[in-house]
Image: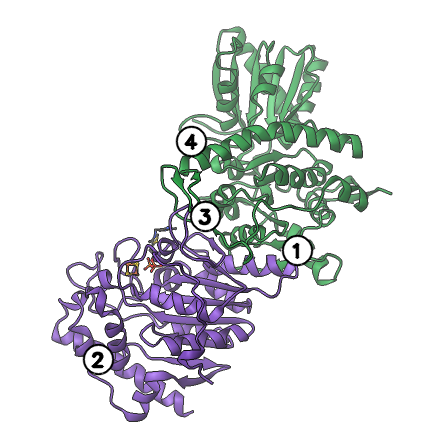
Chain colours: A green, B purple
Amino acid sequence: MSAVQILTGNQAAATAVKLCDVQVISAYPITPSTSLTEMLAEWIEKGELKAEYVRVESEHSVMTVCVSASSVGARVFTSTSSHGLLYMHEQLHWAAGSRLPIVTCVINRGVGAPWSIFNDQQDSISQRDTGWIQIYCRDNQEILDSVIQAYRIAEEVYCPVMVCYDGFVLSHTMMPVEIPEAEKVKNFLPPYKPHTILSPEEPLNINPVILPTQRRDAQGVLRDGYMEFRWKLQHALEGSRDVIVEVNRQFADLFGRDHGGMLWGYRTDDAEVYLVGIGSLATEATMAADMLREEGIHAGVVGIRVYRPFPREEIRNVLKNAPAIVIFEKDISYGYEGALSADVKAALYGTGISAPVHNYIAGLGGRDVKAAELAEAVRSSLAAVAGGVMERQTWLNCVTE
Amino acid sequence: MPEKIFKVNQKEYILPGNRSCQGCGLALAYRYILKALRENTIMTIPASCLTVLHGLYPITSVTVPALNCTFASTAASASGLVAGLAAQNRTEMTVVAMAGDGGTYDIGIQALSGAAERGTDFIYVCYDNEGYMNTGTQRSSATPMGALTTTTPVLTKQQNKKDMMKIMEAHDIPYLATASPSYPIDLYDKFVKAKRIKGTRYIQISAPCPPGWGFAPKDTVKIGRLAVETGMVVLYEIEDGKFRFTGRSKTLAEKGNRAPLIQYVEKQERFRKMNIEQLARLQKWVDGKWNEYLRRAEE
Ligand SMILES: Cc1ncc(C[n+]2csc(CCOP(=O)(O)OP(=O)(O)O)c2C)c(N)n1
Ligand code: SF4
């Protein structure tokens, strides 16, 4: 029997880790991720979860432990936030380059300097080019479900997955969450089969120095050069879209919850303006859309669930008739615009879709942003669009003089 | 009991032809290390000359499974291997992390300290060639005072070598040892012993490096011996806190006939700018360490 419990986002994630029979966990404290791995440590010490817990001295070592334990065939998990994720940066590349199915929860938080413990998505968005799949969650149920799905996806395409959710907004907020039956999860998620096993029976030198060119091995077989390795990672990430969608579909069939595969839409059918966002900001946008519709403005919302691989086709499809697009995001690619805005525009390039795109940078470092303010931003953008303004970058609720 | 030469494992774990330089002290040591550790060994190695020795993809000269890791992460990588293997009940494996002095004394010290403090069940080997050799002989905190490196190219290194053994001993680990490829049986015995011990074991090997130190490849063993004869390198082990001289250093301690440091220094290009005052300081440093060891041996 599945049961409903009232859980924080971190509790939901920990519950999923337990259901997934993770074998090695390593973590280092950082707000707001800490309570997740504290819970796992407690379960392990009480004997409720059978896993190795490696209490290392830094996040760099955390991701190293994940890489090495995964290399010998263990299912691994960690979670972090903000500077912890940034400190892992070298190892994030190493994990993806090693094609290891590591699942990491990123509890999104702003990055310094100066210090902020509050939520935005600068931490994970700025890791978008490391070769990790990135899933963003809307609510605590989706966190639990996405962690389970993440292992299925990761272990099928041999790419690491970040399951990202907003710090405090979700990590420390209680919501009812349906806990799936352990047996059902086991059926959904078969045991991890590593692509290579580091063992004396078949000695390998994994991840040595590699040349730019292809090279023959001792048997005379031509093997990949550095660039072929890179292409294979790119190819795997591009190809993971189908797997992500299929895993979401199978999950929906089995557990009755559909989180939308690559992205989700809300009241998009007849929309005259599309609000696009990631995570809890997109949830906020659905409330703004409701408000706007009450005034007769037909607003719809597109929530990006998977940011890497980027939902190129899905974006084109859903926005193909969009008269106006307003993008809200909690990150900034300094010297340009919001990363999501740049990516959405790039996806539309050459398709004939030439809708105006307005970009709002919002909620950095926990700056409050209410649905009514998003609605007001949309109204202002629509007025500007009517006046012919195609592109605009606005910092919401921010003194910019 | 020390194993006699005829007891040394005849099997070779490094195939003929590897990418280290001629006369590489690391390569000599590595051959004996793998012989002593035998089967069921998993290596993890960071960026270093050892990576190069292991060969370029897709060919390797080493028949032991190895996982390359990033420069700072060696001991954490070992921790991950230990945890991953333990989670699957593969407890027959010996996990060995092996890094240069740069990867140990400098960038890897945090991960190493963490792993040792946790009592991680692995052997950590530092091969100490006293500089960043893979990147072309830059100064590390293991470079001795008075040596020229490419980052101390005019004035020579001004500071003494860091005492990494002391730092590691402060972690209360069950076994620590020093070794030299010039004394392979002493080295071999230490690895045979280390393999049988549980917990974190730290072995530091002095690895003469012809291009980095400036001597002819044929002289590696000779230079390694001179290091020991002069007390620049001292062979010992510390088992459960008990210090013991071993091999040639034991004889030197008993007979009290250490050679003057000049005999070691004058044979290497890296010390060519060393002045009399520096030599005296280095000799004093060596004497001070030696006396400390003598006191400890008597305890
Ligand atoms: C984070 C990082 N910084 C720098 C380097 C460049 N690097 C590669 S090997 C090396 C020197 C290694 O020195 P050491 O550990 O003493 O081993 P040796 O080369 O002497 O065998 C350096 C600096 C790197 N790979 N990673
Ligand atoms: S540079 Fe020195 S340590 Fe490195 S391979 Fe050559 S001889 Fe060995």
Q: Position of residue A369 (x, y in %)?
A: 60, 30
Alpha-carbon span between mark 4 and mark 1: 35 Å
**Residue A8 lies in what quarter of the image?**
top right
Alpha-carbon span between mark 3 and mark 4: 33 Å
- Asked whether, in this view, residue A292 is left or right of residue B296, the answer is right
Three-letter code, disc 2: Gln
Residues marked 4 and 1 touching at CB (< 8 Å): no
Mark 4 lies on a secondary structure that is loop
Few, some or many residues within 10 Å of mark 4 (<14, 14–19, 20+) = few
State the quadrant of the C terminus of chain A.
top left
Q: Is residue A117 above or below residue A332?
A: below
Looking at the image, tell me whether mark 3 or mark 1 is earlier in sequence order: 1
Residues marked 1 and 2 touching at CB (< 8 Å): no
Q: Which residue is mark 4?
A: A334
Few, some or many residues within 10 Å of mark 2 (<14, 14–19, 20+) = some
- Asked whether, in this view, residue A24 is left or right of residue B106, the answer is right
Alpha-carbon span between mark 2 and mark 4: 56 Å
Total of numbered circles in the picture? 4
Alpha-carbon span between mark 3 and mark 2: 43 Å
- Mark 2 belongs to which subunit? B
Give residue B283's mark. 2
Point out the frontmost of discs 4 and 1: 1
Q: Quadrant of ligand 2?
A: bottom left
Evaluate whether label 2 is on the same chain as label 4. no
- Mark 4 belongs to which subunit? A
Give residue A38's mark. 1
Q: Position of residue B20 (x, y in %)?
A: 31, 57
Q: Is residue B234 above or below residue A262?
A: below
Point out the frontmost of discs 2 and 4: 2
Three-letter code, disc 4: Tyr
Who's the residue at 56% across and 55% down the image?
A28
Few, some or many residues within 10 Å of mark 3 (<14, 14–19, 20+) = some
